Amino acid sequence: MYIDQMGREELEHWHQIFCEKHKAFRASSLNLDLTRGKPSTRQLDLSNILDGATKGSYITSEGIDSRNYGHLAGLPEMRSLGAELLGVAKNEVIVGGSSSLSMMYLAMLFAWQFGVSGKGSSWRDQGKVKFLCPVPGYDRHFSICEEFGIEMIRVSMDEDGPNMDQVEAFIANDKSIKGIWCVPKYSNPTGCIYSQNTIERLAKLGKISSPDFRIFYDNAYAVHDLSEDGIDLPKIMDYCREHNTQNNVLQFTSTSKITFAGSGVSFLAASEENLNVIQQHLGVFCIGPDKVNQLRHLNFIQDRSGLKLHMKKHAKLLQPKFSSVLEHLKNNFEGSDLAQWTTPKGGYFISFDTRPGLADSVIELAAEAGVKLTPAGATFPYGLDPDNKNIRLAPSFPSLDDIDRAMRVFCNSVKLASIKQKIGV
Amino acid sequence: MYIDQMGREELEHWHQIFCEKHKAFRASSLNLDLTRGKPSTRQLDLSNILDGATKGSYITSEGIDSRNYGHLAGLPEMRSLGAELLGVAKNEVIVGGSSSLSMMYLAMLFAWQFGVSGKGSSWRDQGKVKFLCPVPGYDRHFSICEEFGIEMIRVSMDEDGPNMDQVEAFIANDKSIKGIWCVPKYSNPTGCIYSQNTIERLAKLGKISSPDFRIFYDNAYAVHDLSEDGIDLPKIMDYCREHNTQNNVLQFTSTSKITFAGSGVSFLAASEENLNVIQQHLGVFCIGPDKVNQLRHLNFIQDRSGLKLHMKKHAKLLQPKFSSVLEHLKNNFEGSDLAQWTTPKGGYFISFDTRPGLADSVIELAAEAGVKLTPAGATFPYGLDPDNKNIRLAPSFPSLDDIDRAMRVFCNSVKLASIKQKIGV
């Protein structure tokens, strides 16, 4: 369907058809939800033996009593696992509580409030502070910047990561830019994978940036492949060592979408110099992380190959849901001028673009018909999508049947909104 | 022993005796530690069934899947337990992760950075900000103030809590005082219990203070009685309601010294108005707390009476250790002019005062003889004990035998340091 090539009569014909379908959906009182990037019940069930995984043995193989206070950097064995996940050395990892978002918040707070390299380096004392935000991106990242009054600058997200020409130009010309948000693998929401070239160029930013520039590198979907083989990302820290920019990257990940969404284990990886500064403040914030939960995860995950096996079970549950969404999109919009979308090989989201100016109308129409979608603009800083076209679809939580029902509503909403705009009703 | 009444000869006689004992201790190469306010292995063992306490049933009685994201304020049933513990209504409680210290840090951060009542109320925009610190007190409280550059003012800790005449005078005369640290029951380290009068006067401070004044009321030892019967503290929130100062108190507690020190559950209680402001920022910091651990605790603790029973088991293990320390102190220093100390009915510490100017020497002598004590000054803001006399003794972790050995060294170190000072060697 190419609506730009239709005459008035044809447009009105289709308008009536989509309107009637919309009415029928409204009458059927659906209550569906495609907003939430959270694991389904069956995915959570995969880790049900987690509670009890210590089997009452709380002392680690290195003799640490996981139940007591202390060990600010986490259990040594867990640091090793994090090191493997994030491609760094063991002493470049801190293992925290259940939320990597909290780790990012604290890293931002410490830099803003106290500085990345001790007295005199606080971002808050340097006037305007800015962050680069590849868009569309993750709303919770943007919320952290907004919380601290850090000005967010949009840069384009391409198929192989942030547009590095834009990124480099901004950084070279403006020393008040102190960081960039990155989700290098299955980026939220486009699902794109950063190329080797992108990752190397990111690692080199420290050579042209302000010295206290920090890449917030949220590798949330490091092992969350939908395909059988999976993909291993080049290690950014290797490039940093090559270019002597180790201090310019802070990496994050967690097991939230590996085991239990709310009760996982988080990791922060950074140079020892960075970790020393962070731990000075982390030691005021808490006495130590929940090490019993770390030990549970160690016993459950075992090692990298145990992890890979476990993630294949997730993929088996997620893959049909992604396929269903993509099938609907293909059947409805392939060879049309109504929409563009991404086809991720992993992660939790599909990014969908309507014709410019329609995201909010589509979301409103879908809501009328009983399908909740992520609010328009959510994937942009300050909630402002300048083209009002991006919608994030999250197929992980609903059942296959619900996805099918919701996607029928969604596709019709897109068509109806498009035609309405075209004929001006 | 009254050294103030001794002549030179007698002093030198004792000096020689204590010196020789000290030498003997040094030769015996002890390696003991009275610094750590952490539960012993046997205490931790009391909660060993905690891991696995969900028995694989992760859905709460109210139908919440504890494994998934969300529920920023914690599980409703856990909020009820916290409400009972802290003497407030259920909707006045947030249940968090494993660290109440982190809750205090965040509450301080949010007030400092964003203000206790929205835009324009940030403490950081009000010039000098000060906190009252009853001394001796808890070093980690003081560290949070120091972290944010909040000036700490010492007030005396009496037998029934902070000296309220001093507190009221400071607050009435200085609107830059934004808070006070309190540990109302078995205060760290004196073990004192705030009287009803103290608690009511605290609740009335809001009537004379700056409107954004906040009492940081850390009820860390709410149920940590050593005696059979235990003590129930008057509820500060009841007095606040009477005097319409509900917004001036933030209460904290945790299960760290009930179940597992590093893997417990924390609680923050405050007026709904305060909680609304706090949750706005908490929602940027994290998606929700570890609810599986909350469910474990619910299943394990069950209710208030289950909790009381469990705490009696702790008391049975702790009581002999406190008795041993107190017995040594009594045998060595009762009817002397060498020392003063507290006799707590609960909590984790005994506060010991040497003659003025001797705490650091005692700690140094004990260290020489193989007994590690909390650093001198640790119980004071900025680590500065103006009288250099307070030493915090923590008998919970070592075995009874180790306490006995350590206390012999400690008592001799006190005597030796006292005589040395008196005769000027």
Image (tube, coloured by chain):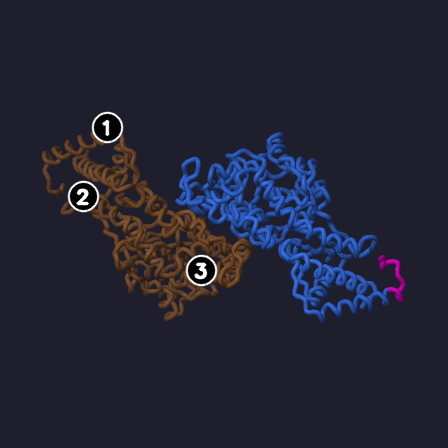
Chain colours: A brown, B blue
Instruction: Give the numbered dot on residue A107.
Output: none
Three-letter amino acid code at disc 2?
Answer: Leu
* Label 1 Cα crowd, 10 Å radius (few <14 / some 14-19 / many 20+): few
- Mark pair 1, 3: CA separation: 53 Å
Q: Is residue A343 left or right of residue B27?
A: left
**How much space separates mark 2 and mark 3, taking CA atoms?**
48 Å
Residue furthest to the top in view is A27
Chain for numbered disc 2 = A
Please state which amino acid type lies under the numbered disc 3.
Answer: Met
The magenta span reads B1-10
How far apart are the alpha carbons under marks 2 and 1?
A: 26 Å
Residue A338: which disc?
2
Residue at numbered disc 1: A27
Q: Secondary structure at mark 1?
A: helix
Q: Position of residue B372 (x, y in %)?
A: 66, 62
Q: Earlier in the sequence, mark 2 or mark 3?
A: 3
